Image (cartoon, coloured by chain):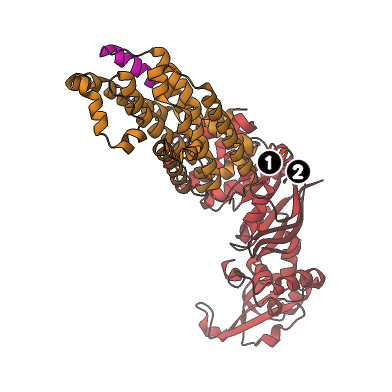
Chain colours: A orange, B red
């Protein structure tokens, strides 16, 4: 058990470290820019927000820029973490099965005494490597960075946000995994998963406060709210449970589909 | 118990039947050649045996395990080695990492011995491998866990002639230890050297299964000779001689002063004594009696002119049934060019 997860996970270490370093640097950049930004605009800072096109403000969940918590919740976490990192996991998961089939590597893998379910689940589990790397490096960068620029932020809330976003990212990966099992070519799976997730993300944020708000319920981004966590210290554990259930359901669907699939 | 049992196996891709009611079995310890031109459906059968795809109809067992039942299939795979036609591995990892992974899943008691013979550069990433080295890595992973059965799809296609010989010797040594093997091929000379029995697949249907020795016996010998004097084919008209061709020339080599020489070739399926007796009447400049190439046999099963070619080798009962079945399939896509590919 777990030989495949360990094998695949080992080969993800370098990529995960690069991604974590890039995302950590990105977070530090945001943090270091904030003092200049806040101090140059002073009390008028939220007037800038009013100048944002409404759709843009909604899309990136901008509630307030007057506090570093509000600033990071929208600029770093909603845009950088939920959207970009979410898409990264959907893309990475979309490659898991389809690439092996496309490159005809799946034959050798399936000739081993392993079940189809094992292949799907352990490949999915190998994404724990980038997930762990990103979820450790980025919060450390944020907490240390904000302290360094003298705009300290609650470490508890940052850690909580990262913990609450783990099932969000696994749900994004789950969408990619299902695409990977459905498509025969990796590029199709990747485009499908990334396109769907981006569509859901923008649909959810733009439909908020409209008659179609209900439609956003199928988007994973509905169930994690960086503003609530960082600004108000509210942890919506019920929403987290929805994401955990969604992840399990997507992985189960991928297993079911892969067990029935003819590898050609 | 048979190592492999295939019963009425049919695999449909829409209208096309890649396998059409294929039935055969491979006994324990046997080396079975699965022959046919490209596109005949050999790979489809192999992929079904390994559970990569499920049959539309019919059933198959490997080492007594039903391949459509996953726990059974996994039990079988512990004792099965598989070598795909073009094995593919993650390009970014080294050969050693691949083998370590395989060893962690299925064991690797033979890994060291195999690497003495098949030695891909293990510390280099696979993207730097030549086709031959990838194939060597494929061979090592297929045999490293000391399987009871190996299933190989065109096993020597990527190997140079020297490695092909090494591979054939390895396979022979392993089968002497009791290994069962199924290998697909469209190269008959290869199959003839290593297989006990062959199944010939044509446009998805199994035309025949036969022992290699019987197949060779049925095709007889090819006789090639240069005989002094001018002769016509009637001079070699003895029972069992087929397709006699004669051509008379002025001389043979530098002996052009000795008068006309006749070059004669024919296929002979009769008694050897009778052949020697008849040939004794001639003066030979040279004589070669060779095994008929399996390609000729192949043509009987694949060629569109199957009836016209077939001499009566004395085992018509076994030949006619499958041939009739084959003729029915002539309108199938891919069948027309099959004989030429082979």
Viewer-proximal residue among A4 and A86: A86
Q: Pointer 2 and pointer 1: residues touching (CB < 8 Å)?
A: yes
Q: Are marks 2 and 1 on the same chain?
A: yes
Q: Residues within 10 Å of mark 2 (few under 14, many from 20)?
A: many
Q: Is residue B304 magenta?
A: no
Whether residue B107 is situated above or below residue B260 in the rendered picture? above
Whether residue B144 is situated above or below residue A160 in the rendered picture? below
- Please, which residue is most extreme toward the front here? A211
Counting from the top left corner in percent of width and height, residue B258 is at 55, 84
Q: Which residue is mark 2?
A: B63
Q: Residue at x 70, y 82 (%)?
A: B236
Give the magenta range: A136-153
Instruction: From the image, give the main secondary structure of the stretch colored magenta.
Output: helix
Q: Is residue B105 left or right of residue A234?
A: right
Counting from the top left corner in percent of width and height, residue B173 is at 67, 43
Label 1 resides on the chain identified as B
Counting from the top left corner in percent of width and height, residue A43 is at 21, 19
Name the quadrant of the C terminus of chain B. Answer: bottom right
Q: Which mark is residue B283?
A: none
Q: Which residue is mark 1?
A: B80
Counting from the top left corner in percent of width and height, residue B144 is at 62, 36
Q: Residue at x 73, y 54 (%)?
A: B196
| Residue B248 is at least partly visible in this image | yes
Earlier-in-chain disc, 2 versus 1? 2
Q: Is residue A233 left or right of residue B164?
A: left
- Give the quadrant of residue B185: bottom right
Q: Residue at x 59, y 53 (%)?
A: B154
Disc 1 element: strand
Viewer-proximal residue among A218 and B33: A218
Q: Residues within 10 Å of mark 1 (few under 14, many from 20)?
A: many
Name the quadrant of the N terminus of chain B. Answer: top right
């Amino acid at each position: 058990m777990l030989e495949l997860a360990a094998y695949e996970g080992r080969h993800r270490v370098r990529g995960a470290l690069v991604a974590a370093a890039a995302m950590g640097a990105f977070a530090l950049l945001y943090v270091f820019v904030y003092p200049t930004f806040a101090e140059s605009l002073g009390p008028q800072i939220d007037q800038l927000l009013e100048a944002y096109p409404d759709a843009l403000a909604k899309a990136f969940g901008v509630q307030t820029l007057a506090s570093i918590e509000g600033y990071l919740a929208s600029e770093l976490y909603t845009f950088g973490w939920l959207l970009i990192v979410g898409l990264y996991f959907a893309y990475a998961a979309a490659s898991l099965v389809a690439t092996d089939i496309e490159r005809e590597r799946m034959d050798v893998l399936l000739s081993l005494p392993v079940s189809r379910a094992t292949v799907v689940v352990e490949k999915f589990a190998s994404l724990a490597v980038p997930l762990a790397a990103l979820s450790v490096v980025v919060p450390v960068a944020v907490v240390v960075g904000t302290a360094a620029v003298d705009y300290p932020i609650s470490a508890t809330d940052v850690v909580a946000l990262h913990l609450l976003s783990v099932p969000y990212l696994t749900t994004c990966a789950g969408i990619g995994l299902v695409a990977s099992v459905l498509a025969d070519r990796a590029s199709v799976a990747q485009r499908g998963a990334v396109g769907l997730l981006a569509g859901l993300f923008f649909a959810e944020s733009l439909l908020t406060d409209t008659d179609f708000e209900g439609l956003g319920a199928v988007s994973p981004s509905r169930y994690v709210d960086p503003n609530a966590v960082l600004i108000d210290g509210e942890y919506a554990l019920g929403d987290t449970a929805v994401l955990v259930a969604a992840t399990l359901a997507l992985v189960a669907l991928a297993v079911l589909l892969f067990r029935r699939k003819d590898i050609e | 118990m048979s190592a492999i049992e295939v019963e009425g196996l049919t695999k449909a891709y829409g209208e096309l039947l890649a396998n059409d009611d294929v039935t055969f079995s491979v006994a324990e310890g046997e080396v079975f050649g699965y022959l046919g031109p490209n596109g005949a459906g050999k790979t489809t059968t192999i992929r079904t045996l390994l559970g990569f795809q499920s049959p539309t109809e019919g059933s198959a067992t490997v080492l007594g395990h039903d391949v459509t039942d996953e726990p059974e299939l996994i039990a079988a795979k512990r004792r099965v080695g598989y070598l795909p036609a073009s094995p593919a591995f993650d390009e970014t990892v080294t050969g050693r990492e691949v083998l370590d992974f395989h060893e962690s899943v299925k064991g690797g008691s033979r890994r060291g011995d195999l690497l003495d013979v098949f030695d891909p550069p293990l510390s280099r990433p696979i993207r730097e491998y030549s086709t031959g080295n990838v194939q060597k890595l494929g061979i090592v992973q297929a045999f490293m866990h000391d399987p009871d059965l190996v299933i190989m799809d065109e096993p020597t296609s990527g190997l140079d002639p020297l490695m092909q010989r090494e591979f054939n010797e390895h396979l022979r040594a392993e089968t002497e230890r009791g290994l069962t093997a199924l290998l697909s091929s469209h190269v008959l000379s290869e199959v003839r050297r290593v297989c006990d029995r062959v199944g010939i697949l044509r446009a998805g249907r199994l035309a025949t299964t036969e022992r290699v020795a019987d197949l060779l016996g049925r095709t007889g010998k090819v006789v090639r000779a240069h005989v002094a004097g001018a002769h016509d084919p009637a001079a070699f008209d003895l029972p069992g001689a087929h397709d006699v061709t004669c051509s008379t020339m002025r001389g043979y080599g530098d002996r052009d002063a000795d008068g006309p020489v006749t070059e004669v070739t024919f296929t002979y399926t009769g008694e050897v004594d009778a052949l020697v007796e008849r040939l004794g009447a001639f003066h030979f400049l040279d004589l070669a009696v060779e095994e008929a190439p399996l390609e000729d046999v192949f043509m009987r099963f694949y060629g569109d002119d199957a009836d016209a070619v077939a001499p009566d080798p004395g085992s018509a009962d076994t030949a006619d049934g499958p041939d009739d079945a084959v003729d029915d399939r002539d309108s199938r896509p891919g069948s027309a060019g099959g004989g030429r590919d082979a």
